[in-house]
Image (cartoon, coloured by chain):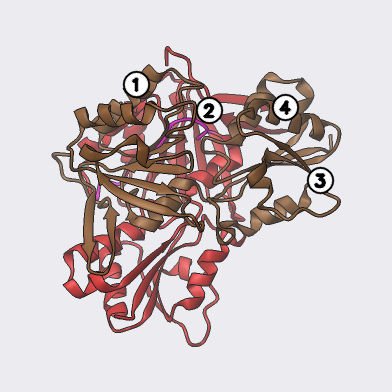
Chain colours: A brown, B red
Amino acid sequence: MSGKVLVIGLGPGSDAQVTPEALAAAGEASDFLGYKPYIDRLSLRPDQTAHASDNREELARARHALELAAEGKTVAVVSGGDPGVFAMAAAVCEAIEHGPAAWRELELRVVPGVTAMLAVAARIGAPLGHDFCAISLSDNLKPWELIERRLRLAAQAGFVMAFYNPISRARTWQLGRAFEILREELPASVPVVFGRAAGRADERMAVTPLGEARAEQADMATCVIVGSPETRIIERPGLDALVYSPRFARPSA
Amino acid sequence: MSGKVLVIGLGPGSDAQVTPEALAAAGEASDFLGYKPYIDRLSLRPDQTAHASDNREELARARHALELAAEGKTVAVVSGGDPGVFAMAAAVCEAIEHGPAAWRELELRVVPGVTAMLAVAARIGAPLGHDFCAISLSDNLKPWELIERRLRLAAQAGFVMAFYNPISRARTWQLGRAFEILREELPASVPVVFGRAAGRADERMAVTPLGEARAEQADMATCVIVGSPETRIIERPGLDALVYSPRFARPSA
């Protein structure tokens, strides 16, 4: 089969953070699927077709991409950030595993990108400078009890945590509940970074101690980073404070 | 003060994975510090000076960068991958916190990049498609007991794990011991991905069940990804198998 699927990560939002590899892959494709704001970031040629869709039907979009590729087309599935982190690459793999045998003969290429937590971390210092984890707070695809359990174990392990999908119109209480759980496990002084739209014109960064962190500080475009007990804040005269997690850890941690 | 420090991530190794932002930042700098192979990836102008150093003295290199910036220079500190993930951004923050007060008045800009685990994941499918953690296996800066504790808690939490610094000439037993610990906590069938030099000419990818994983499969340039019990392998006729972690999780996980 000659068709192929390219799953392309466009980075966190700024054109300056899109890799040449991602642009070259987009240049190869004839058909584009993805959340419209991501596709709009590419300047498609007249011979390239966008099949816009909303952001919620990931598996349907993955199947659509594979159907077009099975017809011989070169199909780009476009993600913000990195497509392998809570994004389309896993959905495409899932569709291949459970789809017709012919889909296993299609070329699949995943093009990595700068994922949101890296862009947010870079803007504030180095909060991911030591061992860390990334957790999706969406309970659409996993039970909330499992998320609670992961939060507690991650805190006990001393991981810095990055939360993806922290809140949405339909999921309003999960982030607040996550903060409540973490307040039982971690010191109230642990810094929480709310990084919204890092690298874009409407960027907004805030740092709040865990004891005072509120879900209302986040929206759908926010990546939330919760420090470990080792995470430090450096105040700077006339400049934003830096938040970082030291490379070393004390035996007591 | 007019000097500044730019901590720049060059991505995992291929020029096509370097962001325009990273190249622009490198273009601003007069002085470059970093492990020589990273600096060699940039084509410096005659008016730009490289201060090469070995890869082990991160804090000394960070202090050197801040000293040059305090003299008014624009200094680039160059990292492979992302500078915020087990790399130079935390070392620079650490040097600022413990250095002269004047260093807190210097501009610091961290430029994110594609970190190794994202590049390796992209090459093999989507093993980081669900909740995951990143752990440095180096016990140079933290006690080995803490690493063991984190490995067990991460396995109990159901995280996919990416290991940075899995092995070196001076640290030969840690990766093998990590596999032993994980064999006590996870099914022997869990896929382990050994991703070496992803995106470079000497790239090498291998997938082995945890029960058979050996430390000798990794070297210093390898990022090791250990799946969760949910992680799947898709065999494909005539193509490399895909490894991915589904977006959903069963309540029993």
Q: Is label 3 on the same chain as label 4? A: yes
Where is residue A24 shown, x and y percent of the image?
Answer: 71, 56
Query: Around disc 2, counting alpha carbons within 10 Å, would you say few (fewer than 14), some (14 to 19), or many (20 or more)?
Result: many
- Of the pair B101 and B172, the residue shown nearer to us: B101
* Mark pair 3, 1: CA separation: 46 Å
Q: Tell which subunit mark 1 falls on.
A: B
Is the C terminus of chain B in the top left, top right, bottom left or bottom right quadrant? top left
* Mark pair 1, 2: CA separation: 18 Å
Q: Assess whether mark 1 and mark 3 are in contact (beta carbons under 8 angstroms).
A: no
The residue carrying mark 2 is: B245
Picture quadrant of residue A94 = top right
The residue carrying mark 1 is: B185
* Residue at horizontal 15 percent and vertical 41 percent from the top: A251
Q: Return the mark for residue A30.
A: 3
Please state if A73 lies on the left or on the right of A189 as rendered: right
Query: Around disc 3, counting alpha carbons within 10 Å, would you say few (fewer than 14), some (14 to 19), or many (20 or more)?
Result: some
The three-letter amino acid code for the residue at tag 1 is Glu
The residue carrying mark 4 is: A63
The segment highlighted magenta reads B127-140
